[in-house]
Amino acid sequence: MNGVTNGLFYMKLALQNIKKNAQTYVPYILTCIGSVMMFDIILTLADNKEIAAMHGGSDIRTILGLGCYIIALFTAVFLFYTNSFLMKRRKKEIGLFNILGMGKKHIGFILFFETAIIGAVSLGAGITGGFVLSKAVHLLLLRLAQAPVQWGLYFSGKAALMSVLLYGTVFLLILAGNLARVHVSSPVELLRGGQEGEREPKTRWWIAIIGTAALGGGYYLAVTTSNPAYAISAFFYAAILVMIGTYCLFTAGSIALLKLLKKKKGFYYRTEHFISVSGLLYRMKQNAAGLAGICILSTSVLVMLSSTVALYVGMDDVTRNRYPRNILLEAVHASPADEAVIAGAVQEVLSANGLGEENHLSYSDLSLLAVEEKPGVFDIKTTYTTADLEKIQPMYVMTQEDYGRVTGNQAKLSEGQCMVVTQYSPYEEDSLTVLGRTYQAVPAGDYGLWDGADTFGSEVYYLIVPDDEEMQLLEAGQQAGEGGRVSSIRYHYGFDLDTDQDTQIRIYNEIMHKASVIPEGIQGESAAEGRASYFSLNAGLLFLGIFLGTLFVMATVLIIYYKQVTEGYEDKSRFGIMQKVGLTRAEIKGSIHSQMLLMFFLPLAAAAMHITAAFPIITKLLAAMNLTNVRLFAAATAGTLAVFAVVYTAVYMLTSRVYLRIVSS
Amino acid sequence: MAVLEVQHLKKIYTTRFGGNRVQALSDVGFTVEQGEYVAIMGESGSGKTTLLNILAALDRPTSGSVLLDGTDLSTVKESGLAAFRRDNLGFVFQDFNLLDTFSVRDNILLPLVLSKVPYLEMECRLAPLADKLGLTELLDKFPYEISGGQKQRTAAARALITNPHILLADEPTGALDSRAADGLLRMFGQINREGQTILMVTHSVRAASHAGRILFIKDGEVFHQLYRGRKTNDELYQNIADTLTMITTGGDRR
């Protein structure tokens, strides 16, 4: 045989192998195609100039770029995992080739051609599919961002090239791994392959303990973290701890528990427990890692979807929290004349447009980022150390006159007194010293904040002082410090408008123009303008949530499918024996069915538990993104969980047909 | 007293669409007395397995009846069959049929657990039985850790722990080497002397030579019977071998 026919021969064998193992290989190839496609699509979108040019487009691009990395990393790891599963099932077949006289070199050729075929199909179909589908996904993104439709078909050469490079490398590494695996094992080992001794799993107590500790730690962090500033890093640590905990508890914890049950003779030797406990023991031994994977993926899908959906749906809340009024104007050191200029400009523009102010709000404040040196004593610094961060206490200084006007509460403070209004826990000290000035603290009683002054979970002090003079002394006090001026007294003027977004933006611009005669200048914000950029940001996040959610669900489906196939082959022989030993078909089916249900729904139950524990910290994270509507988030979480559970059950039922087909064949 | 009475048993298999009819048993009748050790011999295709399946209530006869301790098997309801089998019959199979997820102890206790016997009573029954079958040391091992002979003894213990009316053995030495087979057959002999009724289906002359009576089946009928009388195992072995030769060379019924 010459080289060419030789090559053709191996090529043919490789093709045959793939066909013969279609039950496991077709899902694998579909996963490869899906992976390439998703990566190609998201890279195409990130590379799309039209998206970059739209309002808030740079935010979306950043989010998409982040998505690229996540998808690349996840799919690569996942393809390795799937491949190792496939190779385990094929050991026997490869051993047979070896015994029939094929050298390891020749087996290597076959593996090479198999990988080449799968790689070519995956890349070809993936990139083609990515090109076609990217338009649909592009339109979905525009729809979410409520941006005008862009019709052009866009092919990104860069995305295609990157896909080929990334997944080409992945396939090469997978091939290298497979070759190494074949190389180090003897034919007899390979032949025995699938059926290595059914050893009873050992209890690994220390892993179970580590798992419990990690999970407990993760939950503790998630439930107790109250400061939104730490929420992001706390969430990150909690997520890692929960992942470790999930993995350890699924692998070691489940087995430790089942073995404990087994030791309780009175419990174990009962008809309804006997077969289930020992059956589950072996199922968990073989499936724990996969189930932990399903659980972690499910939890990520739930977290991503529930929070992004909540952000997207709660856009109005977000805008309102970020912008307490539709139009907000700010001037530094505004004199009574300046205040009159602002009020005049507003009245003039509004009456010219036939509109009126609603929910008027105006006051002056001085914001201080104070550090609590000891209880009741505060100071500000020019640079803050990490140790200071934990003692930081944001403060807004206001006069009792402004506070009274805004809230309707008359504080009646006299010289040397102050009142600390808080949102969460009342100020407990008898006095308060800030910037060297000491006040007698008058209890705030029932006095609270006004509409729009929400502090989103972190405590902020509203320091009410008797008069303007006192506030100016504080302003001067910080300016005398080593850092020079840190902040100034600012005048705030805000109101709502009952009109559409475009008019609001036009009116806002007119007012800003008219009021710009103020010597220190004027700053302002329009909620309508801000809303658009929030919209594209949150739409980008929701898009990524859906996109990654789809990917993770795809991975979950594949793992469940493979588990059903393996379980089917394992149970086939057991089924027959049990029948001969004196169980009715109904009893066996009942027992196996309940075991399978328990096994496959354990990850879902654990995921539901995780997301419940994560709820408080995600609430804090969302608060940091200006979403404080806990009810909305709770509804989004419950909704996502319900939809996910339905999808999960459907997947289970569909794949369990494969299982039944194998068992009863 | 007859433990098992088989009368005019007939079994015809019909292919699914009613095409071919295969007569597996044409007219089988025999009785097994309390405490007997009976071997049923026959070539493959003679209807041995069909007979055993019917005796085990795994299959129903076309006509004829099987009475176990006076109870007609055909009167036992389908739903109660598994429990009936568990409580009245013990099985030993050629390929052991041990569950690999259970230890030796749990494999033996399985039928008792299914019959909801209290755990203390299980222990009381297990200890002497395991001792008799030489399994005491192996109770906490798993099937993959023990030899074929030990596996078959485990299977026998599982069959005997329910104190069955009759022990049905299907080619019990088929998967064992000769030493393990001899050990198992000696053990069967011993439990039979202690009063256990045994019915064994086999085509091994050596296995059959341990029985008290041998039935030969050919073409779906009991063709011949052989009683041990006062013969030793070796004499009986010779007798069986001669009978088989006679049957295969087509001799007439004696």
Image (cartoon, rainbow, N blue to C red):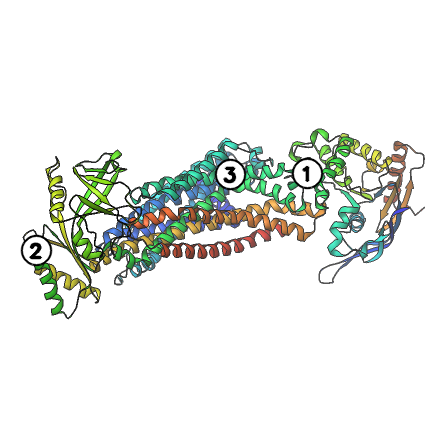
Assign a secondary structure to mark 3.
helix
Which image quarter: residue A194? top right
Assign a secondary structure to mark 2.
helix
User: Which residue is denoted by mark 1 in the rendering?
Assistant: B106
User: Which residue is denoted by mark 3 in the rendering?
Assistant: A251
Q: Are marks 2 and 1 in contact (CB under 8 Å)?
A: no
Q: Could you tell me which residue is drawn at 77 percent across and 34 percent down?
A: B129
Are the residues flagged by discs 3 and 1 from a single subunit? no
Q: Give how far across and how far down residue A633 sits, in percent.
A: 37, 54
Label 1: chain? B
Label 2: chain? A
Could you give the CA–CA distance between mark 3 and mark 2, rounded to whole angstroms? Answer: 71 Å
User: Which residue is denoted by mark 2 in the rendering?
Assistant: A336
The amino acid type of the residue labelled 3 equals Thr
The amino acid type of the residue labelled 1 equals Asp
Task: State which mark lies toward you, 3 or 2.
Answer: 2
Q: Are marks 3 and 2 in contact (CB under 8 Å)?
A: no
Q: Give how far across and how far down residue B4 sits, in percent.
A: 86, 48
Assign a secondary structure to mark 1.
helix
Using the image as rendered, state which of residue A427 and residue A442 is in the foreground: A442
Could you give the CA–CA distance between mark 2 and mark 1, rounded to whole angstroms? Answer: 92 Å
Q: Give how far across and how far down residue A376 sits, in percent.
A: 24, 38
The amino acid type of the residue labelled 2 equals Pro
Task: Say if B16 sits above or below A248 in the image.
Answer: below
Q: Could you tell me which residue is drawn at 21 percent across and 42 percent down?
A: A440
- Mark 3 Cα-neighbour bin, 10 Å: few <14, some 14–19, many ≥20: many
